[in-house]
Amino acid sequence: MKSIFAEKILWEVLSKWKKKDEESSRFDFLRATPFFSKLSNWQLKQVNEVFYERTYQDGEYIFEQGQPGAALFFIEDGQVAIHAKNKSDSLHLATLSKGQFLGELALLDEAPRSASAVAVGPSKLLALYRKDLEVFLNTKPEIAVEIYRALAAIVGDRLKATNELLHIKKEAA
Amino acid sequence: MTRAKRAQVFYGCLLAFGITLLVVLCWFLKGLFFPILTGAFLAYVLRPLKNSFRAPWLNDELRIFLLVSVMMVGLLWAASALRSITPGPVQVAELKTRMKYKFNEKFAEVMNIDEETKKGNKFYEYFKADLQPMIQQTNDYLKLGEEEEALFLEHYKNAEDEQKREYYKYYLKNIYTRIDNGERTIANVHVANKHDDLIHGLSLWILTPLMLIFLLLDNGQIQHFFMRLVPNRYFEMALIVIDELDDAIGRYLRGTLLECLLVGLSMTIGLFLLGVPISVSFAIGFISGLINAVPFLGPMIGCVIGLAYSLIAENIHPLIPGIGPQDLAVAVIALVMIVHLLDNAIFQPFVLGNAVNLHPLVVIIGIIGGSVMAGVLGMLLAIPTLVILRTCIQTLVKELKAYQII
């Protein structure tokens, strides 16, 4: 146990003294998202190792509606447009930018994506694969629990918002 | 030419160059193939053990170092323990002498061959031309090498033990079937070359533990490197395909290994109960377990080896009452059938599930094809290769359809 605390303290101290390099700016970026806000630098380092960095050109699909989901994406640079296709037309739902995330439900199961995501201009994204999170659950449960807790809070908030929207629509009708 | 087209041409050329380089390297470095494959296989099979072997105070490097150290110590201990029960060079020389003598004796008995006139029954006279090369080949195979002969003479020539003197008589009788000295000289040249090959081969096998350590140290870096090469369109699909393949192939390989181990152990225990010495039981059990990976043929070869031993068995002391040397052949056939039944009814369903659901015709063609391409090793690797190929194609087609690509 001593060595784990020593390693943690060492990381914390080093991170304070270290110049703003690529890794620490990545840590800052991750800590700004709800999923990793409570993780230490030492834990963020572990998470950072499992991320896949992907670069997209303008108009390139990140994922398409109806395809099975496998990963959660964080926008590190650029913008991403979210579209949902109906039977005949396509509906623009939102445009996400740096620091935001998309496809979070893929962390739960392989259910089909409910909308498509397209890069708007050159974009850089970080992908967290569902199975890597499941591995964390066995190997580093304290990290996995924080991520799942954040995911549960996000899904809960969305559910509340949807219920409120339905309520407003019902009253209006 | 547009940028996309230029990129296509560039990546196409790079892929073609990569494949050509890989083929050329595989051809020139084919000697490295099996040591590397063994290391990779061991790392793959041991990965769950590595993942479960963890403690909060252990970092990855120390964990792998401890795991490999424990494995090495375990292997050394097992090797020294096995050495005491595996047949040594003297026992091998004795077995070969007994086998050669008994084989010729039984053959002469069955074919009713007269020692003086060298004439046998009608069957023998009719098939003599076909049978003689086979008998000659078997005799050549069981012939003692120069070192083996020296060892045998050292231990058996002036032995006081009755049994050993009997075996020495077998040796003297076998000498009559020996071919001229010229062939022995050629055999010596082959032995010298074999020694050089052995040293060269052993130096290449150093790669196996290195491969094992480096692959155990990998925490997904290799997969991350290859994922960078996957186009964005196929990124998520590639993640799922790799994961499903890893899961299915891992389960199959680990299951097969465990099944072979259980079959080998059952055969060893069974033969030991039948009175076969522990060293011989272990040797036959080990071979039976190893070749059990080849469906149909595995149990048959195990049976043939057991029967071959029952041919020469003389002084057996079975733990099961009522079995004598004359019943050993029947008992070995019964044992092989029991082990085969155990394998089909218990080991396979529990350990493998329906991972090996190949059509029997595919299995037979695969085994024959494997043996034609790479001999015994090809025969052993044919079914795992077919299962892995089938899993790859099935998973790829399933995911390509799920991602609406095909």
Image: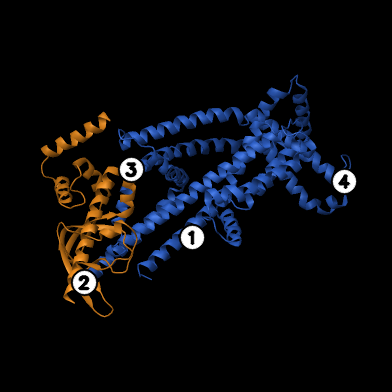
Chain colours: A orange, B blue
Q: Which residue is disc 1 drawn over? A: B390
Q: Chain of mark 3?
A: A
Badge 1: few (under 14), some or many (20 or more) residues near its Cα, within 10 Å? some
Quarter of the image for residue B148 reads: top right
- Point out the residue furthest to the front here: A171
Q: CA distance from mark 1 to mark 3?
A: 31 Å
Judged from the image, the secondary structure of the residue bearing numbered disc 4 is: loop
Judged from the image, the secondary structure of the residue bearing numbered disc 2 is: loop
Q: Chain of mark 4?
A: B
Is disc 3 in the same subunit as disc 2? no
The one nearer the camera, B215 or A4, is: A4
Q: Position of residue B36 (x, y in %)?
A: 43, 44
Q: Which mark is residue B2?
A: 2
Is disc 3 in the same subunit as disc 4? no
Judged from the image, the secondary structure of the residue bearing numbered disc 1 is: helix
Q: Position of residue A94 (x, y in %)?
A: 17, 68
Q: Which residue is disc 4 drawn over? A: B119
- Point out the residue furthest to the bottom here: A88
Question: B351 left or right of B138?
Answer: left
Quarter of the image for residue B401 reads: bottom left
Name the image quarter holding the N terminus of chain B. bottom left
Give the amino acid at mark 2: Thr
Q: Nearer the viewer, mark 1 or mark 3?
A: 3
The one nearer the camera, A134 or B145, is: A134
When the figure is inspected, residue A89 is found, relative to residue B51, above or below; the finding is below
Q: Which residue is disc 3 drawn over? A: A139
The one nearer the camera, A129 or A163, is: A163
When the figure is inspected, residue B105 is found, relative to residue A53, above or below; the finding is above
Q: Nearer the viewer, mark 3 or mark 4?
A: 3
